[in-house]
Structures are given as C-alpha cells and as structure tokens.
Image: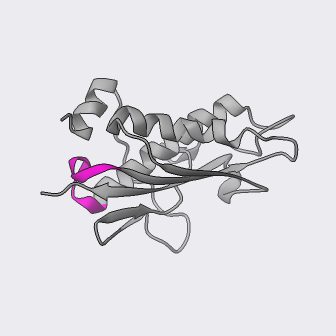
Amino acid sequence: MTLPSEKLAELGVELPEVVAPVAAYVPAVLDRGVVRTSGQIPVVGGEVVCIGAVGEDGADPDDAKDAARICALNALAAAADVAGGIDRLAGVVKVVGFVASRPNFYGQAGVINGASELFGEIFGTSHARSAVGVAALPLNCSVEVEVEFALREN
C-alpha cells in the first residue's frame, strides 16, 4: 500500500502550510475517527488565486477547477495537521464543494472535479460528494471545498 506522503512525492506535489482562518473557526477538527475540515479557499502564499463568480463574463471554469485542486491541498494540509501527519489519513469520505456561479453556469460538478481528481490520485479511491452553486463566497473566492477524511487504524 502506498502512503499518502509517498503518493504526493510521486506526483511532485508539496503539501502547503495550513491556511490561517479568515474568521472565528479552526481549519480542521478530529472527531471519532474522522477529520473534518472547515471550508478551504484557494489561497497560495497568503493570496486568493481565483476570484469572482464562474461562468459567462466571470471566472473561467478551468481556472476554478485548478482552484478547487488548491482548496483540496489546503484541506489535506489542515487535516494532516490535526491527525498527526498526512500518513494518518486513510482516505476521503466526503467532499462538499461550493462554486460562486453566474446565473447561467451549470458546471459546478466539473469545477469540483479538481478536488476529487486530486484525492483519487493520492488515495486511489472514490468518495461521496456534493457540488453546489452559490451567489458568493468569502473574500470573493470562486470556489470553496470542505472535506471529511477517515483516519488510518494503527
């Protein structure tokens, strides 16, 4: 079995630092064998990398999909932090993705695939998921992702 840290190295992906909360919450909590993350936004180096609603005359869906992957990495970092390391994570149970969407944009599932595909590459499994279009997200982000991870049994 390939550990998540080995898979990240194989993919050439570096786990980022945990993104500091922008309000009154913590990035992740451990509860009865599950790590639940708060909504993670596409922050790299302290800057939001994809802003605005997705769709016609708005943010590009491909850019938003890349941003969902960044959100997933940020969620992974937050979960690893409270779990005691990335290799304590057995896999993803559920992903909930929010996409700031123009009224005529219906590609939320494709955007959130950015997160799901990364988790599939790392853990080699599928997960339950919701992809929801919303009017706006914090800091004018295009996408936000929250994740539930199962802990590996010792």
Front residue of 74/153: it is: 153
Residue 59: name its quadrant: top right
Give above or below for 34 relative to 71: below
Give coordinates of residue 66: x percent, y percent: 57, 33
Q: Residue furthest left?
A: 154
Residue at image x 35%, y 31%?
13
Give above or below for 146 relative to 32: above
Magenta residues, start to end: 82-91
Give above or below for 130 relative to 61: below
Residue 50, visible in the rendered structure:
no
Left or right: 100 in relation to 71? right
Residue at image x 51%, y 48%?
46
Asked if residue 70 is among those painted magenta in the image, a careful observer would answer no
Front residue of 90/42: it is: 90
Residue at image x 57%, y 37%?
113
Give coordinates of residue 20: x percent, y percent: 45, 59
Asked if residue 88 is among those painted magenta in the image, a careful observer would answer yes
Residue 89, visible in the rendered structure:
yes
Left or right: 68 in relation to 127? right
Front residue of 118/16: it is: 118
